Image (cartoon, grey):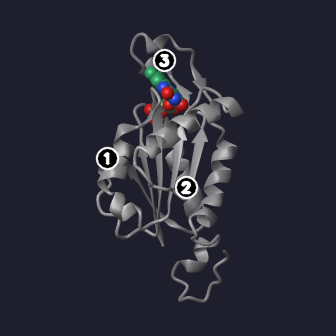
């Protein structure tokens, strides 16, 4: 049972979170493919899809939105979870603000309903930004415990059962926990 974890990033931090999510899914026994959303082609071999995108000026990463439009028909047949990043802190009001932005981006897809949407704090690395954004103070609001907890909850949220290992090459002997 294979899960696609794909990410839209400009400066790398969303890719690192996607990598962590993929690692945790692998630890739970699921096969995963990790790749930038721009490289996603055929979704036929996946049981579920996890998509991550950075948020810039109020909108989810354009490559992620492009994928959701381009492959919507296929994505609608699969359980899909989305994460967006990221606010400057992991405080409730900042997370809620970014959540609002992600919801607004997804609303433009008229009726596309992911199984789950999460928001994680983001990273500001002034050394990677151009003027005037390189004047922003450096910050890293990624809460790795919250990211790990979300990743651990994904098999349940995506309807895959909690024990991936029981489904891999066990000839059907393993029990699936729902
Ligand atoms: C110019 C600029 C605009 C941003 N706009 C938003 C925004 O509207 N909402 C938000 O939640 N985060 C915003 N961010 C924060 C980024 O989403 C955050 O830095 C994220 O971790 C970047 O991901 P990446 O490293 O994968 O590109 C902005 C960052 C920059 C530099």
**Pointers 1 and 2 in contact (C-beta within 8 Å):** no
The residue positioned 56% from the left and 88% from the top of the image is 172
In space, the residues marked 2 and 3 are separated at their CA atoms by 28 Å
Q: Is residue 56 left or right of residue 146?
A: left
Question: Is residue 3 depicted above or below 9 in this figure?
Answer: below
Tell me the mark number nearer the camera, choosing from 1 and 2. Answer: 1
Tell me the mark number nearer the camera, choosing from 3 and 1. Answer: 1
Q: Which residue is mark 3?
A: 126
Q: Which residue is mark 1?
A: 38
Q: Decide which of tag 3 and tag 1 comes sooner along the chain.
A: 1
Q: Residues within 10 Å of mark 2 (few under 14, many from 20)?
A: some
Foreground residue among 120 and 94: 94
Q: Decide which of tag 1 and tag 2 comes sooner along the chain.
A: 2
Mark 2 close to ligand 1, CB under 8 Å:
no
Q: Measuring from the top left, give residue 138's x and y in whole percent.
A: 57, 19
Q: Identify the image quadrant of residue 99.
A: top right
Question: Is residue 136 depicted above or below 98 in this figure?
Answer: above
Q: Which residue is mark 2?
A: 23
Q: Identify the image quadrant of residue 143.
A: top right
Q: Measuring from the top left, give residue 59's x and y in whole percent.
A: 44, 34
Q: Secondary structure at mark 1?
A: helix
Q: Identify the image quadrant of residue 131.
A: top left
Quadrant that contains the C terminus: bottom right
């Amino acid at each position: 049972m294979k899960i696609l974890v794909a990410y839209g990033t400009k400066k790398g931090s969303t890719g690192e979170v996607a990598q962590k999510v993929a690692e945790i899914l692998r630890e739970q026994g699921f096969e995963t493919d990790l790749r930038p959303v721009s490289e996603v082609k055929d979704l036929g071999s996946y049981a579920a899809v996890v998509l991550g995108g950075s948020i810039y000026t109020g909108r989810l990463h354009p490559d992620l939105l492009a994928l959701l439009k381009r492959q919507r028909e296929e994505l609608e047949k699969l359980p899909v979870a989305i994460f967006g990043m990221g606010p400057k802190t992991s405080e409730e009001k900042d997370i809620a603000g970014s959540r609002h932005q992600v919801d607004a981006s997804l609303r433009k897809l008229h009726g596309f309903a992911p199984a789950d949407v999460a928001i994680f704090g983001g990273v500001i690395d002034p050394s990677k930004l151009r003027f005037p954004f390189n004047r922003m103070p450096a910050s890293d609001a990624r809460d790795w415990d919250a990211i790990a907890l979300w990743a651990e909850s994904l098999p349940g949220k995506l309807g895959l059962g909690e024990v991936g290992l029981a489904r891999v090459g066990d000839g059907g002997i393993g029990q699936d926990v729902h």
